[in-house]
Image (cartoon, grey):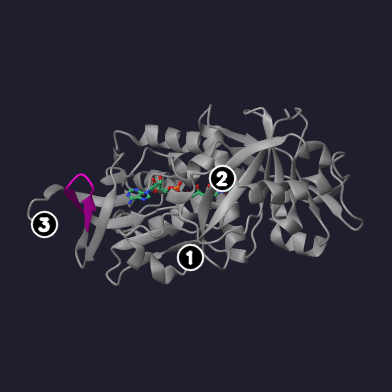
Amino acid sequence: MSSTRRSELADIDVAIVGAGIIGCVTAWQLVARVPGSRVVVLDRDIIASGATRRSAGLHFPRGGSEQVRRMSAYSQQYYERLARSWTGMPIHPVPMVVLTADPVRLHESYLAEAGLRRTALPSFVRLSDGIEAWRGDGCQYADVAALTQQLAAKLRGSVQFYEGTRVTQLTPDPDGVTVSLGTGADLRAGQVLLAPGPWLADPAWSYLTAPLGARVKKVVALHIEQAPSIDDDVVVFEDQDAFLLPLFERGHWLFSYTCREWDVRPDELTTGLSARNLDEALTYLRRHAPALAGRCVGGRVFCDAYSGDGEPRVRYLDPDRRLVFAGAANGSGYRLAPAIARAACGLLDVSTRQGAFRDHQHL
Ligand SMILES: Cc1cc2nc3c(=O)[nH]c(=O)nc-3n(C[C@H](O)[C@H](O)[C@H](O)COP(=O)(O)OP(=O)(O)OC[C@H]3O[C@@H](n4cnc5c(N)ncnc54)[C@H](O)[C@@H]3O)c2cc1C
């Protein structure tokens, strides 16, 4: 380490790198568990400017494995409490219709609390014979960036936010972690939570995250310039991993489909929708919701980290357990964030040192 670097705040319990939904919900839960714990959150940009800013923010009560279903159930209850506790939280319950050719798998994937029951196909959807429509409960969507910023605003005063501050190096040792900053300062923290979203390959930590085996995939959603009506449902095309979401607050529909462009880099995704993205999404929409296809002219494009097995990664990155990774949530980082944060808090000493698990009371 260069002798010209400044040393700051030697007594931080946890430094959280990444002020997206996962970093900020984790900060929230940490402070709730152990009031008075010394937590800082660092982001090279402003709060909620990564994947969180582009998120469609849909939560639906499902999971491809038992673990993800448990995480989904926990997160659903957590968001429900959050929405009940503070008026103005940008979390909006919305009715859900799921379309599938495989009702057995559907019932395995969705939580029992969703109470799936047969319903009619939405009038604007065209599907081949054998497709069934099921109505279910527990779906909501959020303005994820606004929610993250609201959490951060409530945390200020007990958590210190370093925005516009790039982390350039993480150096763990048996007693803690030295966090080197682009400003020329070094922070010393007992532990670090790394919540970098799709910035897995940042040189500051790529050697630490490589063993996770996670990859970064482009995520694309089209905006449909048609105002939803008050009684519109989310329509989930279960077998295609696609959905139509009525974004009432923004005044338009959103169509999310599975883009298969892998190993992209977040800093290079500045060109917006490609002809290929538009063509893939429109081909699907023309077939299954033709009335909406003609109204797509734009959308949102970014990327997210994928673990490879459908389950988010929350684990230590070093033998001394000073560095914890949380993320790679496979395009579900919003809906699973509270459960990911809970798992991360379980790996951060500050929670075990002072005991009680209090996030429920905190809300
Ligand atoms: C178009 C789109 C639609 C989506 N729709 C949904 C959905 O409907 N439902 C759902 O559940 N999920 C959805 N997702 C996924 C979800 O948005 C992400 O999983 C989630 O936002 C990830 O949050 P995060 O906090 O891990 O990452 P991010 O929000 O990306 O935060 C990581 C932060 O790390 C910071 N950072 C990076 N490098 C450094 C550095 N060197 N130093 C300091 N800071 C650094 C970045 O600036 C960033 O703010 C969608 C994603 C996209 C792109």
Whether label 3 touches label 2, CB < 8 Å: no
Disc on the earlier residue, 1 or 2: 1
Distance Cα–Cα, label 3 vs label 1: 32 Å
Inspect the magenta stretch and tell me whether residue 362 lies in it. Answer: no
Disc on the earlier residue, 3 or 1: 3
Res. 260 visible in picture: yes
- Cβ of mark 3 under 8 Å from ligand 1: the answer is no
Q: Is residue 35 left or right of residue 78?
A: left
Residue at the outermost right position: 129
Q: Nearer the viewer, mark 3 or mark 1?
A: 3
State the extent of the magenta-drawn residues as a range: 178-188
Inspect the magenta stretch and tell me whether residue 187 lies in it. Answer: yes
Disc assigned to residue 301: 2
Q: Quadrant of residue 125?
A: top right
Whether label 1 touches label 2, CB < 8 Å: no
Which residue is rendered at x = 67% and y = 43% of the image?
Answer: 139
Q: Which amino acid type is marked by label 3?
A: Ser
Q: Quadrant of residue 40?
A: top left
Task: In this rendered view, identify the residue nearer to me: 26 or 8.
Answer: 8
Residue 308 x/y as whole percent: 55, 67
Residue at the outermost left position: 3
- Cβ of mark 1 under 8 Å from ligand 1: the answer is no
Considering the image in quadrants, where does the N terminus appear?
bottom left
Disc on the earlier residue, 3 or 2: 3
Residue 146 x/y as whole percent: 49, 33
Q: Is residue 115 left or right of residue 307?
A: right
Whether label 3 touches label 1, CB < 8 Å: no
User: Is the residue 65 above or below the residue 274 in the image?
Assistant: below
Residue 348 x/y as whole percent: 34, 58
